[in-house]
Image (cartoon, rainbow, N blue to C red):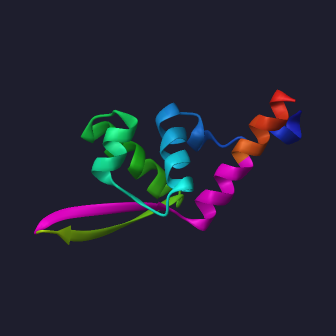
């Protein structure tokens, strides 16, 4: 049991961060507004969860302009993908 629990990542204990990483794992990237609509969260709430995952080096972002409007795209890093997959595998083992 201890071996399984060590693979659970505190970064994904929050349901918004779990959903956020799930969305970024299955998409190459998503922009801020798409994530906000998908997760049904406020700007500030989403920004704080994105910042947390950035600090963990689990996601990265790129800022561009679309029709003179700023657009921020987020994507999962290799480290983030590995951590998320490890977390999901640990949950699956717990459920067995």
Q: Please tell me how many numbered marks the rendered image carries.
A: 0
| Front one among 48 and 41 | 41
Please provide percent x and percent y for residue 12. 58, 40
Please provide percent x and percent y for residue 91. 75, 35
Q: Residue furthest top?
A: 95
Say whether residue 3 is visible: yes
Q: Quadrant of residue 30?
A: bottom left
48 left or right of 42 in image? right
- Image quadrant holding the N terminus, namely top right
| Front one among 46 and 22 | 22
39 left or right of 24 in image? left
Say whether residue 7 is visible: no
Q: In the image, what residue occupies the spot 68% across and 59% down?
A: 82
64 left or right of 23 in image? left
| Front one among 12 and 29 | 29
- Image quadrant holding the C terminus, namely top right
Q: Is residue 45 magenta?
A: no
Q: In the image, what residue occupies the spot 32% across and 40% down?
A: 37
Please provide percent x and percent y for residue 56. 53, 55
Write down the region rendered in magenta: 68-86
Please provide percent x and percent y for residue 40. 34, 33
Q: In the image, what residue occupies the spot 25% across and 41% down?
A: 43
Q: Is residue 81 magenta?
A: yes
């Amino acid at each position: 049991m201890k071996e399984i629990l060590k693979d659970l990542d505190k970064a994904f204990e929050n349901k918004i961060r779990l959903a956020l990483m799930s969305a970024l794992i299955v998409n190459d990237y998503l922009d801020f507004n798409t994530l906000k609509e998908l997760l049904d969260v406020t700007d500030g709430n989403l920004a704080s969860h994105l910042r947390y995952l950035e600090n963990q080096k689990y996601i990265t972002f790129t800022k561009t302009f679309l029709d003179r409007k700023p657009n921020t795209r987020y994507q999962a890093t290799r480290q983030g993908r590995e951590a998320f997959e490890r977390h999901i595998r640990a949950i699956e083992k717990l459920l067995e």
